[in-house]
Amino acid sequence: MKHIARKRFGQHFLTDSAVIDAIVDAIAPSAGDAMVEIGPGLAALTQPLVERLGHLTVIELDRDLAVRLRAHGQLDVIESDVLKVDFTALADAQATRALRVVGNLPYNISTPILFHLLDHVAVVQDQHFMLQKEVIDRMVARPATADYGRLTVMLQWRYAMDNVLFVPPESFDPPPRVDSAIVRMVPLAEPPALDVARYSSLVQVAFSQRRKILRNTLGRWLDEQGFAGEFDLQRRAEEVPVGEYVALAQAIQPT
């Protein structure tokens, strides 16, 4: 029976074989890799991956699709909302600290998924995701550009990221109303020591009113934190490089 894409799950199924081959080549799976696929759907990407891997863990929320996937002898199916999956526990269960995570992420919850995985980055080797192209543009943005924002700063302190492949709407069934792309995310081998909660608060405040100079937003927050150091607040949030946000978060003493 043909599966009808469900709008509430943000389902758009990849059907272009040339694009699928290009994605698999970009991921470069090897036999024995501990790989997890988010949202395998109709297994368009799943099948070529498992042929190279030998075994694959998949996370699927759609009950009907999960039933289909369980019929595949080389798949370990986790029927769950990905935001409820403990990737650290999953890595422990597979006796690895190097999960390779891939997937065609539902565009309506892609940012929450990225932040959820950030909490488990210590057990991740790399991530390859299909996302809305404009989201990837924000992820890989440089300072002083319109795309540079909170998502940029929250991810670039921890990952090296590249936009590796453009995917047009006609590669899907049904076609989405946006362009898509593939992003590669590799955790930094030696990330800066950071209180992530403090960093997150700092970045959220900085970009809360991005048209204003930071003296009117972040300046007040820094005063509340008792910060007495030097930081140029005569800039807008998008003009500050990631490294400066990291250094500022490190300089703030816990209250």
Image (cartoon, grey):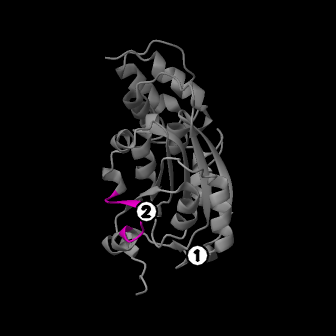
234 relative position to 221: left or right: right
Measuring from the top left, give residue 8's x and y in whole percent.
36, 72
Q: Is residue 234 visible to us here?
A: no
Instruction: Please state which of residues 31 and 222 is positioned toward the viewer in this rendering.
Output: 31
Measuring from the top left, give residue 228's x and y in whole percent.
45, 12
Mark 1 crowd level (few <14, some 14–19, many ≥20, 10 Å Cα): some
Which numbered dot is residue 96? none
Mark 2 crowd level (few <14, some 14–19, many ≥20, 10 Å Cα): few
Kind of element beneath mark 1? loop
Type of residue at label 1?
Answer: Thr
Measuring from the top left, give residue 101's x and y in whole percent.
49, 50
190 inside magenta stretch: no
Extreme top residue here?
228
Q: Which residue is drawn at 56% across and 25% down?
A: 190
Measuring from the top left, give residue 23's x and y in whole percent.
63, 60
42 relative position to 143: left or right: left
Measured Cα–Cα span from mark 2 to mark 1: 20 Å
Relative to 233, residue 117 above or below: below
Q: Pick whichever of labels 2 and 1 is earlier in the sequence.
A: 1
Q: Residue at x 39, y 33 (%)?
A: 201
Q: Residue at x 44, y 72 (%)?
A: 11
- The magenta span reads 70-81
Q: Is residue 73 visible to us here?
A: yes
State the residue position of label 2: 108
State the residue position of label 1: 15
Relative to 169, residue 29 above or below: above
Q: In which quarter of the image is the C terminus?
A: top left
Type of residue at label 2?
Answer: Asn
Relative to 95, residue 195 above or below: above
Kind of element beneath mark 2? helix
Instruction: Please state which of residues 13 and 252 is positioned toward the viewer in this rendering.
Output: 13
